[in-house]
Amino acid sequence: MTNVSENKNKILKDFSLLCEESKLWYSLDNESLLLAITSKNPENLIDHYDVMMTYDSYEILKSKYPDNIIDNTKHSEYGSLQCKFVYNSTNIFEESPFININFILPTKIKKVKNFISLKNKAKSFAWHYSTYNSTNVRKIKNKINIAKLLKLSCNKLIYKDLINSLYDEEFEGYIVTDTFVNKHMIHKWIPNITYKRKTIMFQDMEIKILNEYDIYLNNLFGPNYNQIDLKRPILEHKNMIELWNTNLLEKVFEEPSEIKIEE
């Protein structure tokens, strides 16, 4: 277990308290929301939490706590479209906990489909994986190599580009963003929200979730989301950006190779 996963509950509690103090809107998102609703123990199922925020709330959080925010407009080494809440924004490769921050945006389905273009897919892929320093996963190493080549011909897709492209005052519903631009974005669709939230107990702390979680989780994971049995992922974050196979790391340290001395 890394420092990332060991302190995921602490950073979520600190994040939620800051949001409450500043009256900022947030809700759990993705598997974090699923685990909170299904009451399963997330200790070994995820190594970080995801939340969604309104754009206005995020910008207030960023202005009040700039040292706790990483996004691709403020850090020269960080190219990913994914915004994060952290303890130390100066070193993205430090082994420290983080929270992924997604945006909930009023929009139209046509705008979402238009945004999921080959160009934007390539940009989000290239700038995310080219941010990596290293990994021990061969498939990700290949992605890093491809990303570094693509990056040479792709302008950075900053998170404000995403906001400007998707936001629509004459909206049909709401989309929740994520790390990549791809076809799966459309599953994070919510027909309508009131921005009202519920307070639930999760990991011995009070956490907010949006009232319309049922239809959202249904779109995201299917109608039987309550029956999903999540498994501990093989890949875990060694820091706030890089994924590693921690089982291989443990094997290296726990089972050193034998040294034979010939007589």
Image: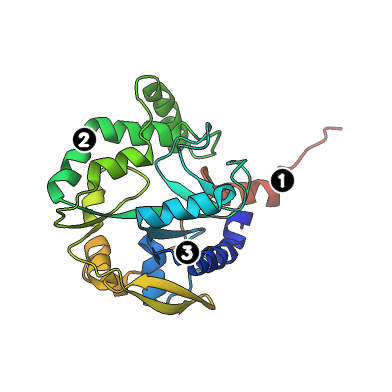
Above or below, 167 against 218 in this view is above
Disc 2 to disc 1, C-alpha distance: 48 Å
Above or below, 186 against 29 in this view is above
Comparing marks 3 and 1, which lies closer to the viewer? 3
Q: Residues within 10 Å of mark 2 (few under 14, many from 20)?
A: some
Q: Is residue 194 left or right of residue 127?
A: left
Above or below, 254 against 133 in this view is below
Residue 22 locus on image (x, y percent)? 49, 65
Q: Is residue 220 left or right of residue 133?
A: left
Residue drawn at (71%, 42%) of the image:
257
Q: Which mark is residue 256?
A: 1
Give the colour scheme shown.
rainbow
Which residue is identified by label 3?
A: 45
Q: Which of 70/48 is in front?
A: 70
Residue 224 lies in what quarter of the image? bottom left
N-terminal label among 3 and 2: 3
Question: Quadrant location of the C terminus?
Answer: top right
CB-based contact (under 8 Å), mark 3 and mark 1: no
Query: SS for tag 2?
Result: loop
N-terminal label among 3 and 1: 3
Residue 243 locus on image (x, y percent)? 50, 45
Query: SS for tag 3?
Result: loop
Given the current orientation, which residue lies at the most extreme right position? 263
Q: Amino acid at mark 1?
A: Pro
Residue 192 locus on image (x, y percent)? 19, 65
CB-based contact (under 8 Å), mark 3 and mark 2: no
Question: Quadrant location of the N terminus?
Answer: bottom right
Which residue is identified by label 2?
A: 117
Disc 3 to disc 2, C-alpha distance: 32 Å
